[in-house]
Image: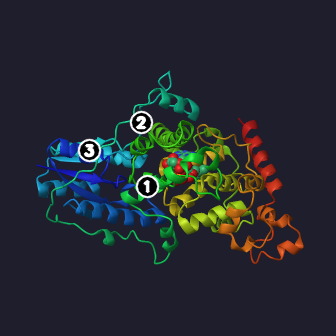
Amino acid sequence: AVALVWFRDDLRLRDHAALQAALKAGLAPLPVYIHAPHEEGTWVPGAASNAWRHRALHALDADLRARGSRLHVFAGDSGDVLQSAAASTAASAVFWNRRHEPAVDQRDIALRRRLRALGLRADAWSSGLLFEPWQLETRGGDPFRVFTPFWNAARRQWNPMPPSPAPQRLPPFEALPGETGIDALGLRPAPGWDASFWRHWTPGEAGADRALDSFIEEGLHDYSAGRDLPARSLTSRLSPHLHFGEITATRIVARLADAGSVEERRAYVRELVWREFGRHVLHHFPHTSEADFNPRFNDFPWAPPDPRLLRAWQRGRTGIPLVDAGMRELRATGWMHNRVRMVAASFLTKHLRMHWLHGARWFWDTLVDADLGNNTLGWQWVAGTGVDAAPYFRVFNPVLQAQRFDPQGDYIARWIPELRGLPPRARHAPWLAGAAARGHIGDYPAEPVVDLAKGRAAALAAFEHVSAGR
Ligand code: FAD
């Protein structure tokens, strides 16, 4: 008998619970992928995600072929495709791994009902998280709203599943009616748009493994101190691989078991648990991918969206070097260092006072690791509107941040060639560097789009207006 194994954001063969479930039940797994962006609610995958997915699907297909199988690819309504694929193969079961995004969860619940009504076994399995999003709760049985107690609870209940191996061989199947190919899904962006990405990334399970190996060799030993320095490559860069499920948190934790020191390992695992916290929050408060977690901000006087300013931010032309370097790193590689994400997001939401959704949507379109749980958590945290948020009145000063975390201006110079001719310390705030130095910056903005002190004061005044109106 056959089980359809429906691949979604779990593009791997190791530690794949749905695939293992089929094998354990003695069923022949038939790997299915369905392109259905219209079922993703308001967060339809963006251009950078699609570019990654295109390559990750090819990598998965190659891995399946090496084991005698292949990926059966469709486009259309997931329910219709699964129903017809099950009928044409006389399948008795459909298995998948969970995704934990509100719109998709709703769809999956409806689908499971529909498939079960047809007499099929339809089951969702763990996606390789350390904890299911509903598993940890406060002593009072409530969801967590603050990270540290969530982390403490995670440590108390620490018991991750051991990862399972990839199957050696899988059975082949004939083509099914309605099948199409990966290249026909239209996932590749306009020619050249993503060309510079692939110097930095190798989508797929093997690429994820190599990224983890090099992190263990080169980054882990200095992670807790080094993870804030954007000029250095001391973080794991596993975020897109984790988002697309090319590697699981449980597998990373197992691989780390005998690597590095206890302190560095713990610092890293804590970040993985931040990712779990994002899923926990989205599970319990599904509206927060669209709306402020803290209703006090419903009346916040956000500045009316100014397309000129938004564009300057998106293009890395605000005149604030650390912000612009980050936005250019994003455009060139599909990724931005976490410290710089915080600074760029703070500048948009505080100094320019734009609603965080403007930034979240741009990140969504341009990040290869765009992830609803993490992106929502990150933006609402910085904006001060979310769970466990940095208070709104704490405004990052992007010049001080640059002085502290990019003291030689190396990161700035890497992404803003116009500023390479300036002495290192002048790169943090070229408008203060004197006319002679400023003669060397080409067409880089001579002045920031907003005066930092005025922008900060306006943000704080707006915030007081909200707190007073409570
Ligand atoms: P490492 O430092 O090596 O961390 C390992 C893993 O832990 C990451 O791959 C990630 O899965 C998780 N992680 C690390 N930091 C965080 C964090 N602060 N919150 C949640 N999980 C974390 N991350 C995304 O994966 N997708 C997003 O769309 C996203 N949007 C963000 C938006 C903003 C405004 C901010 C401030 C942060 C955002 N992050 C997002 C979190 C973080 O910046 C990235 O996960 C991290 O930079 C990825 O690089 P890395 O894999 O080298 O991280």
- Distance, label 2 to label 1, CA atoms, is 19 Å
The quadrant holding residue 12 is: bottom left
- Distance, label 1 to label 3, CA atoms, is 27 Å
Closest to the camera, between mark 2 and mark 3, is: 2
**Could you say which disc has been placed on residue 241 in the image?**
1
Query: Is there CB contact under 8 Å for labels 2 and 1?
Result: no
**352 over 384 or under it: above or below:** below
The reply, left or right, for residue 21 in relation to residue 163 is left
Which residue position is annotated with label 2? 131
Residue at 45% x, 30% y: name it. Answer: 136
* Label 2 crowd (10 A; few <14 / some 14-19 / many >=20): many
Image position, residue 338 (x, y; %): 60, 52
Image position, residue 85 (x, y; %): 18, 57
Question: Disc 1 beta carbon < 8 A from ligand 1?
Answer: yes
**442 over 254 or under it: above or below:** below
Q: Kindly state the secondary structure of the residue where label 3 is placed.
A: helix
Towards the viewer: 425 or 183: 425
Q: Can residue 340 be seen in this snapshot? A: yes
Towards the viewer: 49 or 293: 49
* Label 1 crowd (10 A; few <14 / some 14-19 / many >=20): many
**42 over 223 or under it: above or below:** below
* Label 3 crowd (10 A; few <14 / some 14-19 / many >=20): some
- Check the picture and name the quadrant holding the C terminus: top right
Towards the viewer: 281 or 222: 222
Label located before the other in sequence (1 or 3): 3
Closest to the camera, between mark 1 and mark 3, is: 1
Which residue position is annotated with label 3? 112
- Distance, label 2 to label 3, CA atoms, is 22 Å
